[in-house]
Image (cartoon, rainbow, N blue to C red):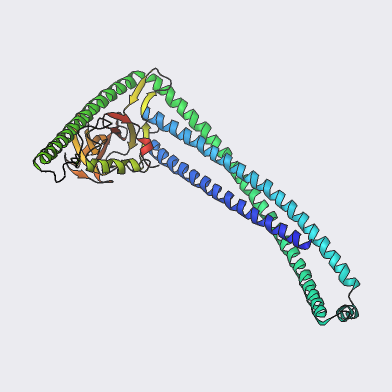
Amino acid sequence: MMKKTIFALLVFISFYSFAYAQANQDKAQLEKERQDIQNELREIQSMYNKVKGQTKQSLGQLNMLKRKISLQESYINNISRELKYIDDDIYKSNLEIYRLQRQLDTLKSQYAHTVVYAYKNRSAYDYLNFIFSATSFNDAMKRISYLRSYRTYREKQVTTILETQQLIAQRKKQQLGRKEQKNVALKNQTQQKNELDEQRKEKDAVVSKLKSQEKDLKKQIGEKKKRDRDVQNQILAIVRREVEIAKKEAEAIAAAEAKNNITKPLTNPTTTAPTSRIKTTSKEGSYLNLNARDIELNGKFETNRGKLPWPVDNGVVSIHFGKYEIEGTKLYGDNPGITIAAPIGVPVKAVFDGQVGGVYNMGDGMAVTVRHGKYFTTYSNLTSVSVSKGATVTRGQTIGKVGADDDGNGGQIDFILMVETKKVNPEPWLRR
């Protein structure tokens, strides 16, 4: 019975240890998520502080506030999940203490029986009589071994009881620590909810001011639409040019190989002529996915989805990809990429290896398009450019500097990602 009790205790402790290790892993992931949220909140707050309080509000300010609110809600949700973990820990720990206490009561009861038995048979005469009443020498040795095992068994009972008592004391101490953690988390949650309320009030104030500036905003959106259209036309011209160049290269190679196959005698009449290294058509109808160099670059670019560096350090997305509506107004826009707020003059970097397909002046700023196989990244609203058309660039290489935003209250760049002529959302491709 004693062995079964000890075995059950060991199994329980092992299971709890595994569950505890798994819980710790989940908590570590939760803590990492919280750190990421806090870091982004600090970045947005730092950027927002530079434009906060200005008499003229901007769409970028509103979008930064919306992002702050979204992150704040995620932060509060993170704390709620932490509180759930703590409550689960407290509950499981209470169960463990209860089970350990029952195990301890059982151990003490069993030990009491052995003590009573030992007391009743405590005289040396009884022990000697037990040994010498053996029927043979081997039987006597077995009885001596039994007495030794019995003494070891009693000692192990005492050790197990002490260890169980220590384990109960440790769990009770941990309970106090978890309850303190819960109190701290609850205070933090209350504080973050208060901050969220303040952020929502601030957002409402900005929306109210934007309503009074609807005429100016309409003009800004119109100017951005024109700028976006001009940039896209430039990109499409570059893509068409690159496709035409790739097409001519493919056709030239195919023609050369066809001529070579005709002039070169076949050693075996049944041998099939070698196929062209570069076909003139593809399933995707693209010449930018056939050249061996482009195929390799396309593959590398695609495997880096979600890992590409941001074109500016510590930048904040002020206008997201696609259609958007300015809250409180009837104004709409459609962003072909993402608009990133960043200090004027900070370096703008290539997100991947490639070749500069074009450098062009948009009137109020410069733009650079880099080709990465069939992928094209464009960086516009640059105050200066440090690369030239045809140059090879590497990931992280500076290609220009951030220009002023539409209001002149800060800096921003427009970052566009296209798969040939198709616009795609760059954010899922960038590392966060």
- Please state if 19 lies on the left or on the right of 114 as rendered: left
Quarter of the image holding residue 326? top left
**278 shown above or below 230:** below
Q: Do we see residue 3 in this rendering? A: yes
- Please state if 18 lies on the left or on the right of 66 as rendered: right
Nearest the viewer among 376 and 63 is 376
Q: Do we see residue 170 in this rendering? A: no
Nearest the viewer among 16 and 329 is 16
Quarter of the image holding residue 270? top left
Query: Residue sitting at 76 percent across and 57 percent down?
Result: 103
Q: Position of residue 48 (x, y in %)?
A: 39, 36
Query: Residue sitting at 38 percent across and 24 percent down?
Result: 324
Quarter of the image holding residue 279? top left
- Please state if 143 lies on the left or on the right of 432 as rendered: right
Nearest the viewer among 84 and 96 is 96
Quadrant containing the N terminus is: bottom right
Quadrant containing the C terminus is: top left
**181 shown above or below 4:** above
Q: Position of residue 147 (x, y in %)?
A: 81, 75
Query: Residue sitting at 84 percent across and 81 percent down?
Result: 136
**325 shown above or below 148:** above
How many numbered discs?
Answer: 0
Q: Position of residue 122 (x, y in %)?
A: 88, 75
